Image (cartoon, rainbow, N blue to C red):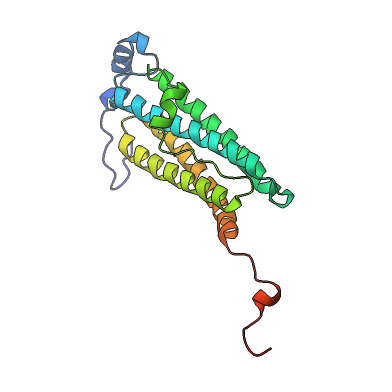
Amino acid sequence: MTRHAGREPAGPPPPAVRTREVRDRALLDLDDGPVTPSNRAELTAVAGLLNVLLASLVVSSLQHEQHALLVRAPADRTIAEFLYACADRDRAGARLLAARIRQLGFAADHDPQHLAGRSRVAFQTFPDGDLAGIVTQDLVGARILVQTLQEAVRWVGDDDPTTRRLLERLLEEKEAQAADLSAPCSAARRPPPATGDQGRATGHP
């Protein structure tokens, strides 16, 4: 066999991918399902982290739903529809987290008495039509989740690649939500243009 110049000969495969050793390790603790000895994560801590994120997404989804109902002006209907879509995506993300918690051998905690206490997002409502307060709070919530997910991705690292990919997927969605909320937030917080006498420069009549 011709060796390529400058290339070192390949060594033996690592133990984790040697056929016999893979089979021997897979036979250990069959009740653990997809969790094998090659998963180096502290699973109890990972499950606790995922339950925190689950609670945060559930609270975020309820807040989006509540805020969408408060947007009454026909001109702002697109914002209400966007908030409904955010609520749906957050619920879908929470379901993915719950499924991963179950795969790791733990129970997802949906108890309403625990959700608000674990959530990183604080639920806040506003009077009807307070568009500035609504979109600002939703943008703040999205940014909180972006930061929390970024920290979670770094913490999990390579110890649990499946969980990390799930967190990265949720992070990408939250970053997109924050980007989409930035424009209406700026517009809603901008003071209305002055009209009539208020728009005229002061001076002699």
Looking at the image, residue 193 sits to the left or right of residue 123; the answer is: right
Question: With respect to residue 78, does 58 lie above or below?
Answer: above
Within the image, what quadrant is residue 67 found in? top right
Seen from the viewer's position, the closer of residues 91 and 21 is: 91
Q: Residue furthest right?
A: 74
Looking at the image, residue 157 sits to the left or right of residue 107; the answer is: left
Residue 113 shows in the view = yes
Measured from the top left, where is residue 195 in percent x and y? 69, 72
Q: Quadrant of the C terminus?
A: bottom right
Q: Residue furthest bottom?
A: 204
Residue found at x 65% / y 45%: 71
Question: With respect to residue 61, does 137 lie above or below?
Answer: below
Seen from the viewer's position, the closer of residues 120 and 106 is: 120
Within the image, what quadrant is residue 160 found in? top left
Measured from the top left, where is residue 142 in percent x and y? 48, 44
Question: With respect to residue 36, does 183 lie above or below?
Answer: below
Residue 39 shows in the view = no
Measured from the top left, where is residue 156 in percent x and y? 33, 34
Q: Quadrant of the N terminus?
A: top left
Within the image, what quadrant is residue 111 found in? top left
Residue found at x 30% / y 47%: 5
Residue found at x 65% / y 69%: 193
Measured from the top left, where is residue 11 in percent x and y? 25, 32
Total marks drawn? 0
